[in-house]
Image (cartoon, grey):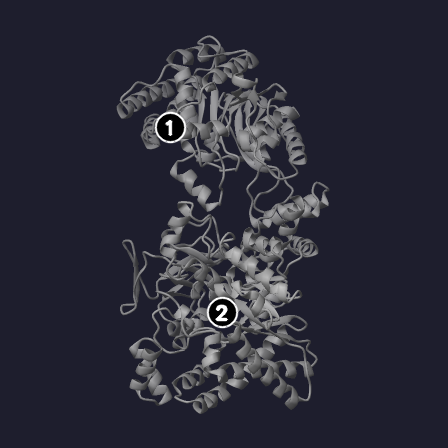
Amino acid sequence: MKSMAVKKGSGKNKRTKYVYFFGHGKAEGNAAMKNLLGGKGANLAEMTNLGIPVPPGFTITTETCDSFYKSGKKWPDGLEAQIKDNLAKLEQAMGAQFGSRDNPLLVSVRSGAAASMPGMMDTVLNLGLTSEVVQGLIIKTENERFAWDAYRRFIQMFGDVVMGVERDHFEQILDKKKEQVGVKYDSELCANDLKDVVRQYKKVYQDVTGEEFPQDPYQQLTKTINAVFGSWNNPRAIRYRQLNEIRGLLGTAVNVQAMVFGNMGDSSGTGVCFTRNPSTGENKFYGEFLVNAQGEDVVAGIRTPQPLDGMAKQWPDIYKQLCAIRTKLEKHYRDMQDIEFTIQEGKLFILQTRNGKRTAQAAVRIAVELVKEGFLKQGEALLRIDPKQLDQLLHPTFDPKQPKTVLSKGLPASPGAATGKVVFNAEDAEAWAAKGEPVILVRIETSPEDIGGMNAAKGILTARGGMTSHAAVVARGMGKCCVAGVSNLQIDYASKEFRTGDVTVKQGDFISLDGSLGQVYQGKLNTMDAELSGDFGKLMKWADQTRKLKVRTNGDTPVDAQVARKFGAEGIGLCRTEHMFFEGDRIIAVREMILSDNKEGREKALAKLLPMQRGDFEGIFKAMDGLPVTIRLLDPPLHEFLPQEEANQREMAQVMNVPFEKIRQKVESLHEFNPMLGHRGCRLGVSYPEISQMQARAIIEAACNVKKRGVKVFPEIMIPLVGMKKELDILAEQIVQVANQVFEEKKMKLPYMIGTMIEVPRAALTADRIAETAQFFSFGTNDLTQMGLGFSRDDSGSFLGTYVEQGIFEKDPFQSLDQEGVGALIRLGIQKGRSTRPDLKVGICGEHGGDPASIEFCHRVGMNYVSCSPYRVPIARLAAAQAVLKEKKK
């Protein structure tokens, strides 16, 4: 629920409250006002109300930022007066005066949006210092070095953040000064050294900006507030929001807070701590601190911080107080906290708390342990985990500490990390892998012919294709890392090399892929294997007890089935039979069938395939003993089973002992301008019924055979690409005839189902008619999205990024379902289908079946199951549980 700014007075005297004060145990805001005060401001207010030692200050609301942008970067009426009122409150609270030489008040100005965006927006410390004020600070603190150190830090931050003076200008001056006096650290510079640094800083500031450093503290404040508002739309903040899918926020709040100083000598310091270990989740106080430093020193890495444990020896009383605050905040927020603190001359102040960022491993452990400790209920723990984060637990990752050189970036098509030697065709991938070489298969785009090489490779890299391209879909099914659609990849198959920017990578060179980020790195990187803990199993058990949707897998082999079953799959929702045709020598029989000019020739070739397909299905049925298996009949167009390049066509002619010209002519005759809308799916079965009949026989014979061996089998035969009921009727009748023949031959019967994929919009619109024949629907959302939006899933990657950036789509519709458009077709299809057949089983088998937002939609529209690639099964289980919990909340 959106927090709204308070309106004061009534009628014409109403005025918006832009500024909220906090200090001395009482605050005008609280943690529930995060949308209005930002996460930082809301938590500062909350901690103040809890009695935590927080330096007083005030927060300018996110609505003010929104107004600032809407009015051409001008302050709304009344803001200046409220800032001055709250500045006066702050002066009273601190017993000091802003701009005073004798008793100066200095402030920090920090950003803080409703969603945590660490390091993405701007901060300025020590604001209020001038040439006059610094002299007063020296007298007041009797610490000349501290005063000049604070002033030089302020000039650098203000110059960099507010006026755009490059940080390097200041760093060079500081480094030169340290070199001159022969010291290593900033803290070793004396007062006179720092005084000279301030003089040089002011000169470079004037040289770059053309104006003197401002000596009016209020002018410094107004400029800095504007800069913090401006940082909401700096490139790194915009990019962070895109990467983390942060949308719908008004802007950033601005927090103006009395300064406390960690750089006042050896009784002062600063640090960052986590109430639990953010890497492992261990319930152990974790963090680091620096003596005689300000906050940015910890982040910048100029000096090496000490582990937090060291505070217990150096400042035992302060450490004890910090431990008590750790316990109080974690208990209050019921989550692991990331806390920033400063110690000023022996007194502890808390500057910030927020829910800490954590690894997937830590997230699972913390959620489970918070339930054990009584802080959370099981449902709350499930909602604490981002389902997509589970990818980190299921796939290898790169060691985060090792240096990396980015070559290029594409789409994160299949998660995981892989390193290997570059090869450019499937044959080389298989040959090199057989010798024990790790390989990365690099292709302009992959096709079903590449399946062997894809299986042999550690990872796959393509120049074309999107998140539902052949490479992406197959890689996810195999659990292989894949980066797709790297548009600046110039691949030269002839010379066996690719170029990206100024770099040329040749066959045999090492590259590394991060399929979770879509990054391509130069050279060989070390990977770390995924580990699943007992906490993970416990979390999944809670998810299974909560969810209503079943979760199946998309799997084409017994290995796929076994992996998915290990991850908790409850059946196979999509078994793609075409991938089986490329194994071993069976591709020759497929090609014989395609080259045949008559039915008899095709049936002869198909007879060779029958035992192979039957064996495939027996293996899958055995692996899925007791669970349903949905097998899709042949879907791709026939030209995908023939080589497209002349050299490969000549090789095929030699192997099969047929004229090259016959193969060339057949390839040409099968060419289609738009094969995705061409002669494929059920259309092949209508034209060549012997193909569907062979596959139906293989399925039913396999089911009968394994049933005799005690396997519980539930086959579901799925007819793809149906658009008209008559297509389905023709093929369903053939399947029933074949099944009855097999039952008669085997002297046994078993239950089976016939259904269809709903992937043509017309099928969704006429689903009531189609459900007269179909016993189940499976929405093939890859093709339904393609046809519903009129986007080629292989070519749209070139512009969909722009569409997302400009807000035409919230997310790539091939990654996350277009719920408004394609979702309307799905909703209508389910309603119409069940109007005819109330017990109609409905699922989804496109790649959207592993996307949490799409899974939540599937729950809402009443599907029975989702089906996704094996490694996404745990993600789908958790997302399905979260869909139930979110529905209950609403």
Position of the C terminus, as image quadrant, is top right
Q: Residue 47's spot in the image, x, y percent?
A: 62, 27
Out of 574 and 584, give the one closest to the viewer.
574
Q: Secondary structure at mark 1?
A: loop
Q: Secondary structure at mark 2?
A: loop
Out of 742 and 698, give the one closest to the viewer.
742
Q: Which residue is mark 1?
A: 72
Residue 664: image quadrant is: bottom left
Label number found at residue 723: 2
- From this viewpoint, which residue is outermost toward the top? 102
> In this rendering, does residue 468 appear at all?
no
Q: CA distance from mark 1 to mark 2?
A: 53 Å
Label number found at residue 395: none
Q: Image point 34% across, 82% down: which residue? A: 666
Which-is-in-front pick, marks 1 and 2?
A: 2
Q: Image point 33% across, 86% down: which residue? A: 653
Q: Is residue 819 above or below residue 44?
A: below
Name which residue type carries label 1. Answer: Gly
Q: Is residue 626 above or below residue 405?
A: below
